Image (cartoon, rainbow, N blue to C red):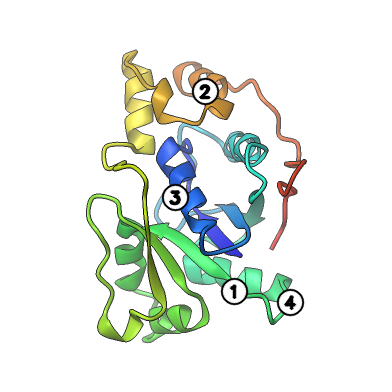
Amino acid sequence: MALFPGTWNPPTVAHVDIARAALGQADEVIWILPRVFPHKSFEAAEFEARRAMLERIARECAGFSVAISDGGLYVEIAAEAREYFAPDVEIAIVLGRDAAERIATWNYGVPGVFDDLVRRHRLLVAARQGEYIPALRHRERIVSLPMGTNWDEVSSSEVRRRIAAGGDWRHLVPRAITEMAGNLYSEGIIHGETRTAAGSGSAEREP
């Protein structure tokens, strides 16, 4: 299985494409929403709103599910998941090029944290505005995800900008959350559900 952590403010069609590509490497992709972020805060959309959007997306694909993490860093999220799942379950981590570069150079306070993460968990890295080039010692543990479309211009911040400006944005988010995203980012409210994702393969997990 593969963990897909993110801020999801909001999830975009690029995120969905990355998650679907990761299903070629794992039997399930778990969209992870941290309760806290190491480098961002809950702006524009609150925690429950982001959770509701993820749950709607998870209902659209049998290979998707949603989980909440008390950790903020990738290493913390992975460690939390390892405590939850059986020891023989392989846990990969899905991320974009920018996130891969960030966690590879993050100051964890002690040396070797990223090396240990890669040793324990394969990284499934999607090319976003360029392809991630891993260090030679990591290349057997870092997989480049093939993307069906170039999503370089699609981002959560671009969705928010277009909604605020009254521009064309609906094609940038999954149809499952179009109305929800429009209400949330244009009016500061959300009309939606915060129920546990249910249905084919979409039950929420709490690692």
Give the x, y percent position of residue 93: 50, 65
| Disc on res. 79 | 1
> Label 1 is placed on what type of residue?
Ala
**Looking at the image, residue 159 lies above or below residue 97:** above
At 61% from the left and 55% from the top, the residue drawn is: 30
Disc 3, SS: helix
Q: Are marks 4 and 3 in contact (CB under 8 Å)?
A: no
**Looking at the image, residue 4 lies above or below residue 9:** below
Kindly report which numbered mark, 1 or 4, lies closer to the viewer in this rendering. Answer: 4
| Disc on res. 86 | 4
> Which residue bears the numbered disc 3?
18
At 65% from the left and 53% from the top, the residue drawn is: 68
N-term mark: 3 or 2: 3
At 32% from the left and 32% from the top, the residue drawn is: 158
N-term mark: 2 or 1: 1
How far is mark 1 from mark 4, CA to CA? Answer: 12 Å
> Which residue bears the numbered disc 2?
178
Give the x, y percent position of residue 12: 44, 36
Badge 3: residue crowd in 10 Å (few <14, some 14–19, many ≥20): many
Determine if residue 41 is in view: no
**Looking at the image, residue 37 lies above or below residue 167:** below
N-term mark: 1 or 3: 3
How far is mark 2 from mark 1, CA to CA? Answer: 33 Å
Kindly report which numbered mark, 1 or 3, lies closer to the viewer in this rendering. Answer: 3
**In the picture provided, is 33 more to the left or to the right than 157?**
right
Quadrant where the N terminus sits is bottom right
Quarter holding residue 52: top right
> Label 2 is placed on what type of residue?
Thr
